[in-house]
Amino acid sequence: MQIFDNVTVDGASAFCPGFDEEDNQPHNGVAADLYDLTGEGDTCSPMGSANKRASSSSKRATSIATTGESPSKRTKSPMVKALRGLVNEIKIDREEGKKKEDNYAKREEARSRAIVNAQAQIMVQKRQAIQEEMDQCVALAKECGVAEASVEMWVASELFMDANKRAFFRAMQTIEARLAWIQMHCQQRGIVTKK
């Protein structure tokens, strides 16, 4: 396998240590051997002097002239500008839509939180109202002569769990009527009370 097979190697930019550029002659050793390989004077070599003239005419001419102004920039087509503008508008619309969605989600979350808080507050108020009614009914039962550790108080406490029965008990005007109501419910359940 040959490294430079079917490749023309031009040694014009090559540099070899020991080669003096002023007299174009190698001084010694490897540089001299390489000089022999360059084919100077060989008409069949691509580096030969006959081929240098032919190949130099096919090279592009270089200009060392300077111009006073820089080359004009290529302008983008109106279609590209319009397309970029459209893409920017879509991005802006998408960002605004996302902001609106975020704001809507935040409002809905705040609304839901407010509803839950309001419901919790209503439940607390209802429990407080029920507790106040129960306390009032127990006080009225004690006023009738029902002892806290009695069977009548246990029956009364079960009766007071119903809002309608609490309301009815509180609506009674006399102490005797309240006591008779509790004792009647004890008899319905088969519980004997002291009179």
Image (tube, rainbow, N blue to C red):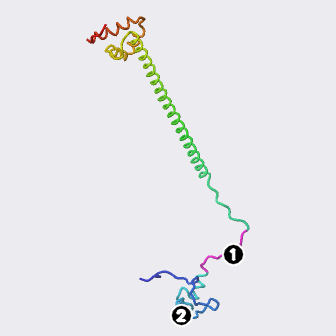
10 to the left or right of 150: right
Above-or-below relation of 145 to 67:
above
- Give the side of residue 130 with respect to residue 17, left or right: left
* Residue 141, picture quadrant: top left
Give the amino acid type for the residue marked by disc 2 in the picture.
Answer: Gly
Label 2: which secondary element: helix
In the image, taking residue 100 as reference, residue 168 lies left or right, namely: left
Q: Position of residue 22 (x, y in %)?
A: 64, 90
Which of the labelled discs sits on residue 29, or is there none?
A: 2
Residue 75: quadrant of the picture: bottom right
Place of residue 96 in the rendered image (x, y in percent of width and height, measured from the top left): 57, 41
Residue type, numbered disc 1: Ile
Please tell me whether residue 53 belongs to the stretch shown in magenta: no
Q: Residue at x 32, y 9 (%)?
A: 183
Residues under labels 2 and 1: Cα distance? 38 Å
Where, quadrant-wise, is the C terminus in this rendering?
top left
Q: Which mark is residue 64?
A: 1
Q: Position of residue 168 (x, y in %)?
A: 40, 10
Query: Where does the magenta region start and end?
Result: 57-67
